[in-house]
Amino acid sequence: MLQTLLPPPQNCTFTLTLMVMAHTTPLHRLWHPFTLLCVILLRATPSLSIDAHPQDKASLFLFGSRLQDPYQSLSSWAGSNCTLWSGITCDNTTGRVLSINLTSMNLSGQIHPSLCQLPYLSKVGLSRNNFTSLLPECFGNLLNLRVIDLSYNRFHGGIPDSFMRLRHLTELVLSGNPALGGPLPPWIGNFSTNLERLHLGVCSFSGGIPESLLYLKSLKYLDLGNNLLSGNLVGFHQPLVVLNLASNQFAGTLPCFSASVQSLTVLNLSNNSIVGGLPACIASLQALTHLNLSGNHLKYRIYPRLVFSEKLFVLDLSYNDFSGPIPSKIAETTEKLGLVLLDLSHNQFSGEIPVKITELKSLQALFLSHNLLSGEIPARIGNLTYLQVIDLSHNSLSGTIPFSIVGCFQLYALILNNNNLSGVIQPEFDALDILRILDISNNRFSGAIPLTLAGCKSLEIVDFSSNELSGSLNDAITKWSNLRYLSLAQNKFSGNLPSWLFTFDAIETMDFSHNKFSGFIPDINFKGSLIFNTRNVTVKEPLVAARTVQLRVSAVVSDSNQLSFTYHLSSMVGIDLSSNLLHGEIPRGLFGLAGLEYLNLSCNFLYGQLPGLQKMQSLKALDLSHNSLSGHIPGNISSLQDLSILNLSYNCFSGYVPQMQGYGRFPGAFAGNPDLCMESSSGVCDDGRTRTVQGSSFREDRMEGPISLGIFFISAFVSFDFGVVVLFCSARARNYILQTKV
């Protein structure tokens, strides 16, 4: 989902960067005579001193004295020279205060009415602070105000009617005050014929858009996004430049915005309830650079001849119900202009990916996931040399990954999971050396992991799960030093687990389940994963939500036509080695990881005793079932406060577990351990036998006689072995608690 950036309401600040080439020229030769003259003039110019008007000084100081200023940002407000006062601009002649800009100073408190006793004030900028109050009614007395920016504070209530007296106002910016709401005033569109910019986004305004706003000729920038506004979407009758109505409750069909054909550059109507199709007239918006219609109920086919201008940088139609084929040519392109981001994901598009998409030479992000696309990935996709993100997941694509994809040398994310792709992982993919996300899970890839993938040193998320990959783990993986998530689950890998398995510094999730790995589990390296070893006591995520790994990749295109790529990985910190052929004892170091949230070693051939788990304070789920573990149940497991899932069933645990240890909150956790006595509420074992002396359970019962003893061992042997065989051979009987999926 694309988040469209709106132009900032304040004046732009340009930074000039001088690039000095490294030469062997002596330093004194770099001084140009003109540069020396500028330095001399700067030193010769005396600093300007303006004495503030006494009345303005008193009003301003009173306002400042009532604020909480933890960083002492206003400490310069002293004396009479107002050129030294932070954020204040005075008239050179009269000393009257003309402008206040206290943006991002971490100020808090309420605005004292003395601020409204500055009669010549034309600009008030208090954005990005922590002011908490109603919007000041007295602002209506400042008749010279041109700009009000109170955005991103904690103002509440509504817009005071006194604001309608501000006839000269050109900018009203109140965005980012979530408690500011109520209906938009009916006068909002006719109180000032000079109003060019109205930003009320990320507030709680409700109701419809006042009709007066639809006809305000001076209005160019309108941001009403992220509110509770409703009603049918209608056209505006003035030439807008930016229109943001995203994340509201607007309904109806999409208007043509014919009054803005030559002016509209940004149109963001995402996350509403707009219905109908995509009208061809939208493509006639000649100046359009950003179009975001995602998250609506738009449907039908896109008109084949609907072609957007080469000026369009961003096209986001995701999360709708569009169907039919993707238009063969969706936008014009030139050598220097064309789409930077194309997002058609989460629709019902069918057919093949148009070859002409590979002609969008400026494309940096391509999202076509969650559709009904078939056929092969276009062979010429490598022509898109600026691509940073490719997401074609959750389709029905077949064939293999085109070799030409190595031409996308700027690629950060390649996401192809849940398709019907096949073939091998090409050794040449190491050319994608800045790749951070590689997800080819749930396909039909085969063969081994090439050693050359060691060249992909930037990889952070790798998911090869649910394929037909085989072979042993090679040392190429050790070069992925930034690895956070690695899943090789449900493949045909074999061989011993390498000694470097737990040495990645940033690893959060490691899933090797459902393979044929054998041998011992390597001991944990306490100098390895910092996350495995660090307990985060502040994070409390619901287990059900955290069990599913979620990867969200997003891209934002700025006004400079540059794409910013980010991703968010949501997963539990855990290790899953279940359903392999591992044997031996579980390394004790594995039970000393304070940051581990889940551990699944079920369905292996592990033996030995279970050590104390008191160090695993973050543990939420533990599954050691279907092994041959023995000994007593550690009494400190139940003391793990975050533990929600426990499964130690079908092992060889023995001894007595008193009810007071609190294992009753894990029903079925100890099933299939015939020598284990769980105390019930009646004081007897849960199989009906009376508890004997602790530590000697079952001994006296087994000494009743040779016949009883023989029958007991024969029946126990037959029943237990038959049960183990059935459980290991029946897929349905393996109810694994922890499985992850990207």
Image: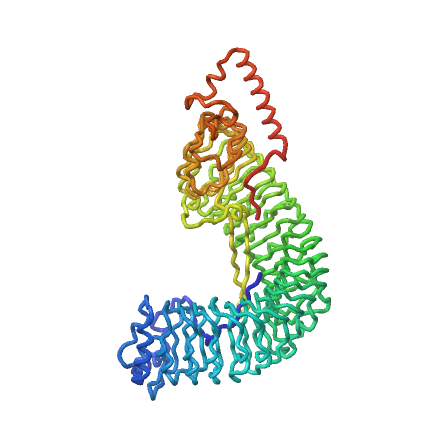
- Residue 50 at least partly seen: no
Please indicate whether residue 526 sits to the left or right of residue 724 in the image.
left
Image quarter hosting the N terminus: bottom right
Work out whether residue 36 or residue 112 is closer to the camera in this orientation and state it: 112
The image position of residue 612, as x and y in percent, is 41, 33
- Left or right? Give the position of 588 relative to 200: left
Tell me where residue 169 appears, x and y as whole percent: 48, 82
Q: Is residue 83 above or below residue 557?
A: below
Q: Going by the picture, which residue comes out furthest to the top?
A: 706
Q: Is residue 214 above or below residue 633?
A: below
Residue found farthest to the bottom? 93
Q: Which sits in the foreground, 184 or 471? A: 184
Towards the viewer: 159 or 533 = 159
Residue farthest to the front, as pictured: 682
As drawn, 283 above or below 465: below
State the scheme by which the image is colored. rainbow
Instruction: Give left or right: position of 17 versus 324.
Output: left
> How many numbered discs sit on the rendered protein?
0
Q: Quadrant of residue 93?
A: bottom left
Image x and y of residue 45, in percent = 31, 83
Name the spot of residue 456 as percent of width and height, x first: 53, 50
Q: Is residue 658 visible?
A: yes
Viewer-proximal residue among 261 and 30: 261
